[in-house]
Amino acid sequence: MRAMVISGGGSKGAFAGGVAQYLVQELKYDYDLFLGTSTGSLLISHLALQKIEKIKSVYTAVDQDSIFSNCPFKIHQKYGTNNIKIHHLNVLKNFYSGSKTFGESYNLLHLIKKTLTVEEFNALKEDSVDIVVTVSNISLNQVEYISINDCTYDEFCEWIWISCNYIPFMTLVKKNGCEYADGGLGSMVPIEEAIRRGATIVDAIILQTEVTLSNRMPSKNVFSLLTNMFGFMLDRIESQNIRIGKYVAKHNNAIINFYYTPTVLTTNSLIFNREKMTNWWESGYNFAKHKNVETNPIEIE
């Protein structure tokens, strides 16, 4: 049983799309399971449908307006570096309306429903391939994995959206009496879950370099401090997920092929730049091609 696992990583998901395109279209890998966290959850349904050009055109064209119905920050460029600043008016409007977060991301939910049609959803449910998204149940303090087989169309679209909601910048969703948020808060790289579901070969696309290649820029304001802090936390969660995944794979005779980003793509994955994301998609495709032509896929030791 072969599984594709795509980690969280915001705008860096464009790189994952390029890697996945090569694995699906060129290497013709036949996947039984697609498992995604956060930005990875946006890709997996279309990868399973093999509608890669469709998701590529949508994914590389998104911007802040595509994601946020109320964006809590402004992007400021200085000396070639993008920084975020608080959008005071939008944040105050959000708090005044009773929201628990700085911003809202309902536009992303609309985009998900516009991109994944009911007909495509039904085709996926009729197929034997399982599509699973990762969410964090804040109320119960646990990670949950939601399969397309257990959902209606509206429910599945909402779970994909929830998996991407990077709080406190995006929407905190109350569902089934619990508060839910970005799956990456609990499981950035759900390799362990893929193996638990029976995978013997896992192609894991990690939207981070294998080793730390740069230091974060000093915090300029409270928002940049929060993004740096959450970035640090998610990096630690990701490293832990990978270590656990390797351990579980070893004890279940499973193979993991890792696809890390070869360079640092961005230090702020909340900034969506169409040109950069288009380039990252092509870079991911070329990286996967080079990796599979020049070397064998990395297996755990």
Image (tube, grey):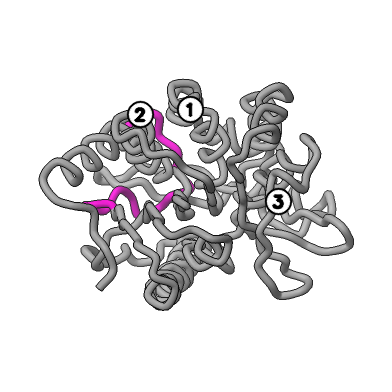
Tell which of 275 and 179 is nearer to you.
Answer: 179
Tell me which amino acid carries mark 1.
Gln
Q: What residue appears at the point 60 percent right and 45 percent down from the top-left corner?
A: 131
Q: What residue appears at the point 48 percent right and 31 percent down from the top-left corner?
A: 59
Q: Position of residue 276 (x, y in %)?
A: 32, 34
Q: Position of residue 127 (x, y in %)?
A: 63, 34
Q: Residue furthest right?
A: 177
Tell me which amino acid carries mark 2.
Gln
Q: What residue appears at the point 46 percent right and 60 percent down from the top-left corner?
A: 224
In the image, residue 247 above or below residue 158? below
Tell which of 145 and 277 is nearer to you.
Answer: 145
Question: How many labels were placed on the picture?
Answer: 3
Label 3 neighbour load within 10 Å: few <14, some 14-19, many 20+:
many
The earlier-in-sequence mark between 3 and 2 is 2
- Write down the quadrant of residue 204 in the picture: bottom left
Residue at the disc numbered 1: 50
Q: Which range of residues does the magenta coloring cover? A: 261-276
Residue at the disc numbered 3: 171
Tell me which amino acid carries mark 3.
Thr
The earlier-in-sequence mark between 3 and 1 is 1
Q: Decide whether residue 293 is among the magenta residues.
A: no
- Write down the quadrant of residue 106 in the picture: top right
Under tag 1, what secondary structure?
loop
The earlier-in-sequence mark between 2 and 1 is 2
Residue at the disc numbered 2: 25
Under tag 3, what secondary structure?
loop
